[in-house]
Image: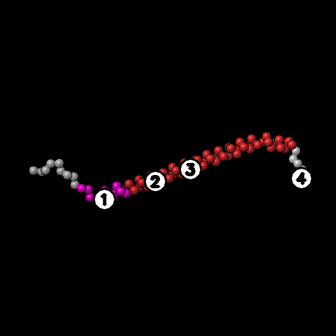
Amino acid sequence: MTALPWFFWLFLFLLLPVAIWWYGVLARRLSRSLRIWVSRSKLRCLAAVQRHLRRLLADEVRAESDEEAPRPAELRPRP
């Protein structure tokens, strides 16, 4: 097995910062897309909970309106 020439090692050494920079770019892109996905998931979950609570509240109001409302108390007695 032959040894690689010195300029090959020099070339690799000079390319190392470029490779590190490129992997940093990929890592930033991945973390950004992950953050966006988590943010959207949280918003979807929050919207679903709000819809569910609104539906429950609307059902509760409908159930109360179906019941007979109590008669208002008279402020002064009739003569």
Mark 4 / mark 1, whichever is N-terminal: 4
Figure check: 65 above or below 28: below
Labels 2 and 3 touching (C-beta < 8 A): no
Per the model, the C-alpha gap separating discs 1 and 2 is: 26 Å
Instruction: Give, as a three-letter code, the residue at label 1.
Output: Asp
Of the pair 7 and 42, the residue shown nearer to us: 7
Instruction: Using the rendered view, name the quadrant where residue 17 is placed.
Output: top right
Write down the residue under mark 2: 49
Labels 4 and 1 touching (C-beta < 8 A): no
Tell me the crowding category of disc 2: few under 14, some 14 to 19, or many 20 or more residues within 10 angstroms, Cα based: few
- SS class, disc 4: loop
Instruction: Give, as a three-letter code, the residue at label 3.
Output: Val
Write down the residue under mark 3: 38
Depth check, mark 4 against mark 1: the one in front is 4
Write down the residue under mark 4: 1
Query: Residue 66 — which label?
Result: 1
Figure check: 11 above or below 62: above
Per the model, the C-alpha gap separating discs 2 and 4 is: 66 Å
**Residues in magenta, as a range:** 58-70
Depth check, mark 1 against mark 2: the one in front is 2
Of the pair 21 and 6, the residue shown nearer to us: 6
Give the number of callouts: 4
- SS class, disc 1: helix
Depth check, mark 1 against mark 3: the one in front is 3
User: Residue at position x 64%, y 48% from top?
Assistant: 30
User: Residue at position x 29%, y 59% from top?
Assistant: 67
Instruction: Give, as a three-letter code, the residue at label 4.
Output: Met
